Image: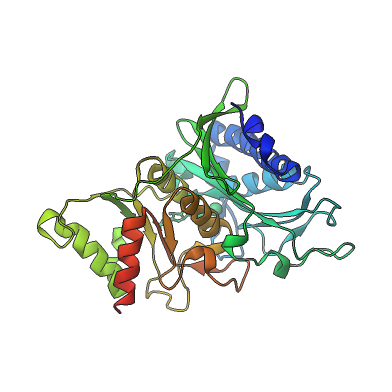
């Protein structure tokens, strides 16, 4: 079964937009594969105050150009652009907003480690005909998403997607550029013994996160009663794909180096799409106070603390946070 066949039962306008995003990711995959010094060269600084690599901008350009072909697309927002990109007025059969991180894991480009694209699709509920979209129209909570997905540019190019009825996986055939369904329904084991965190930040974390890591490091003689393994790729997409495939929990929590900043990762186009996918696969996503799908939206590029993955681990993290 192909991606196109898999989408036969989705709303036609939504299916068309997802297929346009998939086409863009085929182009991005080809650019990633070619490599080149210009990909990892710093080219500018984005709204986040982060250095933009050549490939960040290339991937952003491709997504904006290709996704705009979809008649149902009213507006877009990108990690790499300050403001939204209005595309067209709402159409009679409704419309959508597309939000994306065009290239996730930029620090891995020059060392040939998997990078990815993350996307979120929201219903254009706020759209008013003849009024161009404004950022506030896109600032909807994660639970409102109509679809969410990511693509990993790794040894295989894989897309994982949900339109609200479970999570499916697709692998790109490099000869035909067709996305073939490789997993009909991906589910997350409730129990895991594998966690992912940038351990070098230990001294900056809040106490509940330090306690969580202390417990897993104590292994089978500690309070968790079993040994744990750790992985950290440095690309959220690659870490989350491992977790969707074999279970696990991923943490990028608030830390005290920038106390006014809720976290490192962005809510609208990293945490929310991943939270919908993980929720649909039976896992959970927590921001230190509430489920990420319910995190109030205060800005297009707002950051959030992220603890996401197998249900048992996120439940335990919620308990540790409740006791503070
Ligand atoms: P991006 O490249 O889009 O800025 O995202 C990178 C994020 C995320 O993918 C990854 O988990 C995290 O940054 C890695 O952060 P550290 O380099 O601090 O470990
Ligand atoms: Mn990212
Ligand atoms: Mn990025």
Quadrant for residue 263, please give it.
bottom left
Q: Position of residue 125 (x, y in %)?
A: 74, 62
Q: Position of residue 323 (x, y in %)?
A: 29, 77
Q: Is residue 100 left or right of residue 131?
A: left
Give the vertical position of 39 relative to 195 (above or below).
Answer: above
Q: Is residue 147 left or right of residue 274?
A: right
* Residue displayed at 56% across by 72% down: 296
Looking at the image, the residue that sits furthest to the right is: 130
* Residue displayed at 24% across by 69% down: 211
The count of marks equals 0
Query: Quick one: quadrant of the C terminus?
Result: bottom left
Query: Quick one: quadrant of the N terminus?
Result: top right
Quadrant for residue 206, please give it.
bottom left
Report whether residue 81 is seen.
yes
Q: Is residue 154 left or right of residue 177?
A: left
* Residue displayed at 53% across by 56% down: 270
Looking at the image, the residue that sits furthest to the top is: 175
């Amino acid at each position: 079964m192909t991606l196109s066949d898999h989408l036969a039962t989705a709303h036609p306008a939504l299916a068309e937009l997802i297929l346009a995003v998939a086409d863009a990711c085929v182009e991005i995959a080809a650019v990633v594969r070619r490599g080149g010094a210009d990909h990892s060269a710093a080219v500018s600084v984005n709204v986040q105050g982060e250095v933009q690599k050549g490939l960040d901008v290339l991937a952003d350009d491709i997504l904006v150009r290709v996704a705009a072909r979809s008649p149902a697309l009213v507006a877009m927002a990108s990690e790499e652009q300050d403001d939204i990109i209005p595309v067209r007025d709402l159409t009679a059969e409704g419309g959508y907003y597309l939000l994306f991180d065009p290239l996730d894991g930029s620090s891995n480009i020059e060392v040939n480690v998997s990078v990815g694209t993350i996307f979120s699709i929201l219903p254009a509920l706020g759209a008013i005909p003849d009024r161009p979209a404004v950022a506030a129209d896109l600032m909807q909570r994660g639970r409102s998403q109509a679809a969410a997905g990511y693509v990993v540019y790794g040894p295989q190019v894989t897309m994982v997607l949900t339109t609200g009825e479970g999570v499916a996986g697709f692998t790109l055939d490099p000869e035909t550029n067709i996305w073939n369904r490789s997993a009909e329904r991906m589910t997350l084991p409730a129990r895991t013994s594998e966690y992912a965190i940038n351990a070098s930040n230990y001294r900056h974390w809040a106490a509940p996160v330090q306690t969580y890591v202390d417990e897993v490091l104590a292994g089978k003689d500690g309070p968790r009663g079993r040994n744990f393994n750790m992985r950290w790729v440095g690309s959220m997409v690659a870490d989350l794909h491992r977790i969707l495939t074999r279970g696990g929990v991923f943490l990028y929590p608030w830390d005290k180096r920038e106390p006014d900043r809720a976290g490192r990762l962005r809510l609208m186009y990293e945490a929310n799409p991943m939270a919908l996918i993980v929720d649909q696969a039976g896992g959970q996503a927590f921001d230190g106070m509430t489920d990420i799908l319910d995190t109030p939206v205060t800005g297009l590029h707002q950051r959030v603390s992220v603890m996401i993955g197998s249900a048992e681990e996120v439940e335990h993290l919620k308990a540790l946070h409740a006791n503070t």
